[in-house]
Image (cartoon, grey):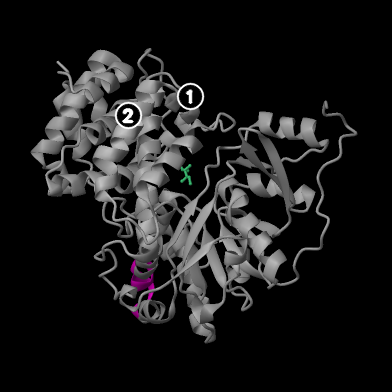
Amino acid sequence: MAITAATPRIQRSSTPATQPGIIHFGPGAFFRAFNAPYTAEAMAAKGGDWGIRAVSLRHADSRDKLAPQGYAYTSIALTPQGKQHTIIEVINDILVAPEDPAAVLSALADPNIHIISLTITEKGYCHHPASGALQLDHPDILHDLQHPNTPRSAPGFLVYALAQRYAAGLPPLSVLSCDNLPANGVLTRRVVLDFAQAVQPELAAWIAQEGRFPCTMVDRITPATTEADSAQLTADAGYLDQGCVVHEPFRQWVIEDNFVAGRRPDWDAAGAQFIKQRPQEQTAIGQETAAPPRGVAAFETMKLRCLNGTHSTLAYLGYLAGYATIAETVADPTFAALLDQLWTQEIIPTVPPPEGADLTAYCVALKQRYLNPAIQHRTWQIAMDGSQKLPQRLLGTVTDNLAAGRAIPLLSLAVAGWMRYVGGVAEDGQPIEVRDPLAAALRAAVDRSSTPAETVDALLAIQAVFEPTLAANTHFRDAVIAAYTALLQHGAHRTVTQTLEGTSLC
Ligand code: CS2
């Protein structure tokens, strides 16, 4: 069906909840494909005042697309057999923080809001990716420490929102990170406490005591929505929808059941899994990253290493080999073999299985998810922000293997693939549009080096990404230099083949 002036636009059919209970930062495609449908289904099953006010920290795009349709939109599950459309009506409105930060703070002061949830991507936490500490010299953090009434960053909004509650004698909010970070609740708590400590130590002590930062593991492959997706929806369903999202049918949400006064939606009625918090997981200020993965953190480690680690590997090496999507990359038997060997030899041995999980079965199912031809998940999209992703996706796995004396040829190749990619020139000589907060520094490190060893050393010296002990490990360094050299000489495809065969790379 062609779009004409008469094509109707999707409109909300139900009245928005008068009393929203959640403020969500980051109303992009993942939130609309994941948090919003779970919450709508939980309320349909069990009720509750859990309408969502969303906040965009950067752009007006989501608000501009969704406001004219009453914040209703279509969530489209892409299965190899066809599509399933679900209309989602759970968003009350979207505030655009840069337009009116004070309006966001006043929304956060509403005593009926019990949860702030976050899908702001890794870089939204303004932390040092390698250590997890807040970057106190980050430009947005410096700004927010000076401007309590007009913050820009997520940590700034969170701390000033909690400060309002503290001053008003109210209980704090639960802060629910839904980003792909290790022990994401612990990390969020750490950046909030670091910021609060710089504002008012007494406030930090109250947040440490009373605040709740449940860890979560979130999983649903959600490629960026394209114009073609919206046009196809109009052709299939007969209406315009500028806010639609496409995603795989699979979804998994594991949540630590640790909310202020136990107030949270019954997301389990929609299939989410709540896990009880173990008492010893409540940590003091400064001890947040010491604990080994347990509870939800174990699910998060499994997902970050098995899924996101291989996603990034396929993104860098697949892009260099000329593949546009993950499905295309994995359809190549060489890359399918890379995936299998990476899991069995170098990833699974490092992952303590979460309760009830079978890691082999998990990876077998994962491969089928990657192969879903209906999902056009671009290697370029996943390659974005590698400096923020590498530590939790690949480098922790490298460190654990080194400690156990296991070889790391494929992980080293993945890291070398990232190094080759951030140089910004593809194998056919075309420029690569590298999107990364550290893009300029990464490119400069590559450009000022004249040998592969110099390039690898210059990138290993970036401490935001590589912890000094890992960067100084000669076994790791030598393996990355060998892989990087091979990538330059033979290209990604041949290097993957040779590495799998264990043949000489020279
Ligand atoms: C992907 C993830 O873009 C990326 O970096 O690895 O968004 C991935 O699709 C999700 O984590 C799947 O749950």
The residue drawn where x is 57% and y is 37% is 224
Q: Nearer the viewer, residue 442 or 253?
A: 253
Furthest toward the right, the residue is 6
The answer for how far apart the CA atoms under marks 1 and 2 are is 14 Å
Judge whether residue 110 can be spotted in this image: yes
Q: Which residues are magenta?
A: 194-201
Among the two numbered marks 1 and 2 on one chain, the one whose residue lies closer to the N terminus: 1
Furthest toward the bottom, the residue is 169
Image coords of residue 228 (percent x, y) = 67, 28
Asked if ligand 1 lies within 8 A of label 2, the reply is: no
Q: Is residue 165 above or below residue 451?
A: below
SS for callout 2: helix
Tell me if mark 2 has few (under 14), some (14-19) or many (20+) residues whose alpha carbon lies within 10 angstroms of its own: many
Image coords of residue 74 (percent x, y) = 72, 45
Residue 312 forms part of the magenta stretch: no
Quadrant that contains the C terminus: top left
The residue drawn where x is 41% and y is 46% is 362
Q: Nearer the viewer, residue 30 or 298?
A: 298
Judge whether residue 464 can be spotted in this image: no
Dividing the picture into quadrants, the one containing residue 113 is bottom right
